[in-house]
Image: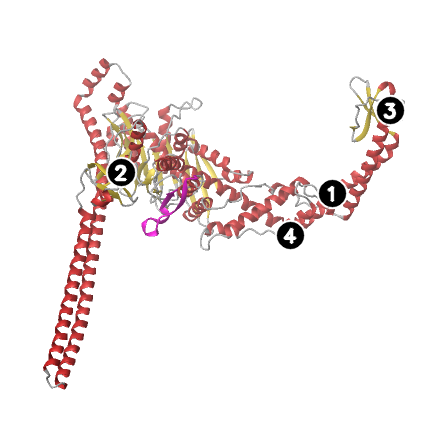
Amino acid sequence: MHIKTLTLGTQSTHNFSRRDAYGKTFFSMIYPKNFEQKIGFDSIRQMIKEFCLSPMGEKYVDKIRFTSNFELLTKLLTQVEEFVQLLSMEGNFPSFDYFDLIPELTRIKIEGTCIEQEKLFDLKSSLTTILECVSYISKQEEGKFLTLRTLTEQVEIDQEIIFYIKRIIDEKGSIKDSASAKLKDIRKQLASKLSSIDKRINSTLKQAKKAGLVNADVEVSIRQGRLVIPVPAAYKRQLKGFIHDQSATGQTVYIEPEEIFDTNNEIRELEGAERREIIQILKNFTIFIRPLIPSLLEAYKFLGLIDFIRAKAKFAIKINGIKPKINNEQGFSLEKAVHPLLYISHQKQSKPVIPFDIELNEEQRILIISGPNAGGKSVCLKTIGLLQYMLQCGFLIPVKEGSISGIFQKLFIDIGDEQSLENDLSTYSSHLLNMKHFVLNASPQTLFLIDEFGTGTEPQLGGAIAEAILEKLNEKQAFGVITTHYSNLKLMASEGNGVVNGAMLFDTKAMQPLYLLSIGKLGSSFAFEIARKIGFPKIVLKRAEKKIGIKQLDFDQQLQQLEVEKKELEKEQEKFHVADDFLSEMIDKYESLSSEIESKKIEILENAKKEALQLIESSNKLIENTIRDIRESQAEKERTKTLRKKLLEKKEEIKTKVKRKELSVNRNEEIEKVKTKQKISSKINIGDFVRIIEQDVKGEVLKITDEDVIVGFGSVTLKTQLKKVEKLDKKESQNINKPIRKTKYSGILNELNDKMANFKLQLDVRGKRGEEAVEMVRQYIDDAILLNIREVKILHGKGYGILRSMIHEYLQTISEIKQYKDEHIERGGHGITIVILK
């Protein structure tokens, strides 16, 4: 990659060029030089470094660069997306011993050098980690994590390296006695000499104590690596030996007894021989791995890259980042976008972040955002710039699933004060220099972002220059977002010219910004409303109103309030759509039930016809036999009477069977009709006793409101939907305890009743952040246990499964839960968790 910096006035621009595998060059331009600081990406770099486990990963963070290469960008994003999925799975990905051995391996390439003993232990630990990472990825289901699998294919580690290291060092990193026969012999001799010298010096000390040369509490000491006895200076000539040291006061001298002097010298020689043998062992190992160093360096590059990807995945989880659909063209359509740094900051303070939707395409390439000060315009602008830059640096971004993003070759931003005393530049002059760069370098592959466009000079002149600049950028087919208060810029938007307005909404009733972006609408600055809210002198405001005209103020206020009311109506309309879907579902169930009854009726009638045919056939046989008997008996009167009697009895029997079958069919039809009527349209009144179908709980109806019903069970009440209860007959109603109206614990019971009345059998946490969702589940399960609810459902959606995993981890800690499982695949599957309480 080549980086070139061009200077323009006080600013400079970074040009990046990369070549792909086919030699094609991809050119990118970022302006100004401090682009990352302006949008806050430098803070994100630092956060990613904090997630890294090694200096190797941090070096990759330093190398992060903006790219417009579609294939490369897709690969980078897929790597992070796959790693997010890996981290959400059961089993922990290896996260220890990410040691950087690249400098040491590079050093020992030179003949005559050897690896350091401390690095040998790190080499064994880190090579084990690399093999565990490769194994963890490789053992996953075939066909998944393809980009990560590709990385593992480059890793080649000779297992004999690890076996060799284990033969020469122990678990603490010390060289084993068995590392070589010579070392084993040296250490054996050394141990023997140390044992001998220890006995002899202790014997000498004992004799000195008896002779009164030293105090009774004196112990053997060490000076200059040799065993010595502390002796008062007055008796130093009475103990034969060599003085190695004396105390600071000179009152104590440290004497090595002469009988151990030669042995101590032998020990020093053995220790020197031990060090030389250890060096030889390390040299032999170094000679063994020197031919393998190139493959080992590649393995450590893999470990650093895995550390880097893991850090990006950890950050993506922290901000709820996803990979949007990437198109190899310009433009984007982002839903529920949030500023990642603002989200992290507000999360620490338990404050919500209001997301926004934004779209730039060929029909609306340039968005002009207007609205009140402190209403979110600049935050919106920075969010767009940061998310696009993050995405093209290979980061997942915090947007809703289904969002789409394109790729830009150039990103330009003009935000903040760039005045310079050194270069004699005012704020407006620096803005003009930026605009000069924009106009000269813009193209259809450019995304420009300008905050407070046109300010810094006389409004009429500044507005005219800003309008001309925007026209030129529009002619160059560039994409962009600007914020402004200038009316002439707002009026530039018209159908078909590629420019569209956007407004940051303001609640004129509550007198506060809503931080909501509405595309296609003009925004007002609400300067007067904000001034009144902060207590600005009324007399000054009245003068200002006279100067601008009250009609203009009313128009701005009414226009903005209409937008607020429109948003409220859209929310209500969404509720009606949900209710309509529910009604459609009930109609489908009714039609299905009716069809089932009709099919059963047809089946019963068919069976009845078959039985009737069988009766007719048996009757015909009886008649034929009777006629034959009459003929054979030649019409004897008694015989004829008997046969006629049998025939009549059979006739009556057939009539009885047919009548019973008809009654059975009619009764079945009536039963099905009654059941259907009870299920679909049974009239339930206050005071009736009912059963909640899903819970098999019985109680008395206390109140009915529209589609809801409040049912009392002893001292507790529950609010549920009318369609979820069925009326009981008188016999079942007699065995039910009526609700207790008043008790001495009425305060507690009322609180329980309120909880039960408002308790829902399903909790929806979709769209919530991880910690927020777990807290909601915690409160929900506590309420369910308190109210003795048997079964509840938690709707968390599917996505990457991160929210599901966090909720399941929490549910494992609750002893009152008997079982939790996924819903049936046809009713939501992994997106819904069923919780069964004890």
Above or below for 505 versus 837:
above
Q: Which residue is mark 1?
A: 278
Task: Please tell me the numbered disc located at residue 210.
Answer: 3
- For marks 2 and 4, give the CA distance: 78 Å
Magenta-highlighted residues: 814-838
Picture quadrant of residue 114: top right
Element carrying mark 2: loop
Left or right: 498 as drawn, with respect to 410: left
Of badges 2 and 4, the one in the foreground is 2
- For marks 3 and 2, give the CA distance: 97 Å
Which amino acid type is shown beneath numbered disc 2? Answer: Asn
Which amino acid type is shown beneath numbered disc 3? Answer: Lys
Element carrying mark 3: helix
Q: Which residue is mark 2?
A: 737
| Residue 327 inside the magenta-drawn segment | no
Label 2: few (<14), some (14–19) or many (≥20) C-alpha neighbours in 10 Å: some
Of pointers 1 and 2, the one earlier in the residue sequence: 1
